[in-house]
Image (tube, rainbow, N blue to C red):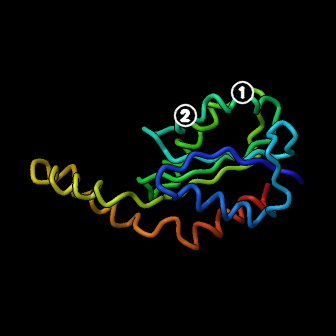
């Protein structure tokens, strides 16, 4: 089975998922031409609850294609949240694209984000302390457990 990857990774987290996907599917099976691929993996970091808008021009070629969506987001801990984000990813695809699999996990954020949260928590601790806790939980993600879960999701489709 041939596959292609369309990807946007701002901090390297989603790139780590893409690298694991390539290892799982076999790098020799990857093709550069999305139109000729049997499966297209579309990966993105989460931007305001959705896919990176920079990917939008590349999505039109997915009409009629089998698509596996994947990504990372700084906020996590809830499959329901991940599902909402992936639903937004899917909504960005052409109507006749067929989503055959999906995967989302938490990704670590740059240290400057935590610094900003700490400063803002002085003014509004009830709002920002949970954000600091989430930041700390995200450190090291995607981890090996996340990468194996991605591989399992790929095998399932």
Q: Position of residue 146 (x, y in %)?
A: 58, 66
Mark with earlier residue (1, 2): 2
Q: Secondary structure at mark 2?
A: helix
Q: Position of residue 3 (x, y in %)?
A: 81, 50
Quadrant, the C terminus: bottom right
The residue lying at 48 percent from left, 66 percent from top is 141
Q: Position of residue 55 (x, y in %)?
A: 60, 35
The image shows residue 61, relative to residue 129, as above or below, that is: above
Q: Residue furthest front?
A: 32
The residue lying at 31 percent from left, 61 percent from top is 111
Q: Give the CA separation, mark 1 to mark 2.
A: 13 Å
Question: Seen in the image, is 141 located left or right of residue 61?
Answer: left
Q: Nearer the viewer, residue 125 or 18?
A: 18
The numbered dot on residue 54 is 2
The numbered dot on residue 20 is none
The residue lying at 57 percent from left, 53 percent from top is 104
Q: Position of residue 123 (x, y in %)?
A: 10, 48
Q: Residue furthest left?
A: 123
Q: Nearer the viewer, residue 79 or 99?
A: 99
Q: Secondary structure at mark 1?
A: helix
The residue lying at 42 percent from left, 54 percent from top is 74
**Residue on which disc 1 sits:** 60
The quadrant in which residue 108 appears is bottom left
- Dot 2 surroundings within 10 Å: few (below 14), some, or many (20 or more)? few
The image shows residue 21, relative to residue 61, as above or below, that is: below
Question: Seen in the image, is 60 located left or right of residue 48?
Answer: right
- Dot 1 surroundings within 10 Å: few (below 14), some, or many (20 or more)? some
In the image, which is nearer the foreground, mark 1 or mark 2?
2
Q: Nearer the viewer, residue 64 or 19?
A: 19
Tell me if label 1 and label 2 are in contact, CB under 8 Å.
no
Question: Seen in the image, is 39 located left or right of residue 75?
Answer: right
Quadrant, the N terminus: bottom right
């Amino acid at each position: 089975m041939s596959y292609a990857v369309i990807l946007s990774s701002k901090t390297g987290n989603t790139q780590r998922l893409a690298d694991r996907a390539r290892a799982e599917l076999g790098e020799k099976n990857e093709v550069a031409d999305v139109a000729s691929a049997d499966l297209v993996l579309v990966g993105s970091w989460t931007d305001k609850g959705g896919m990176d808008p920079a990917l939008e021009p590349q999505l039109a070629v997915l009409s009629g294609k089998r698509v596996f969506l994947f990504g990372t987001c700084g906020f996590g801990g809830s499959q329901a949240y991940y599902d909402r984000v992936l639903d937004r990813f899917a909504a960005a695809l052409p109507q006749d694209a067929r989503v055959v699999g999906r995967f989302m996990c938490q990704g670590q954020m740059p240290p400057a984000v935590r610094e900003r949260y700490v400063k803002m928590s002085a003014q509004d601790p009830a709002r920002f302390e949970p954000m600091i806790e989430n930041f700390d939980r995200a450190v090291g993600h995607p981890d090996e457990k996340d990468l194996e879960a991605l591989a399992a999701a790929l095998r399932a489709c």
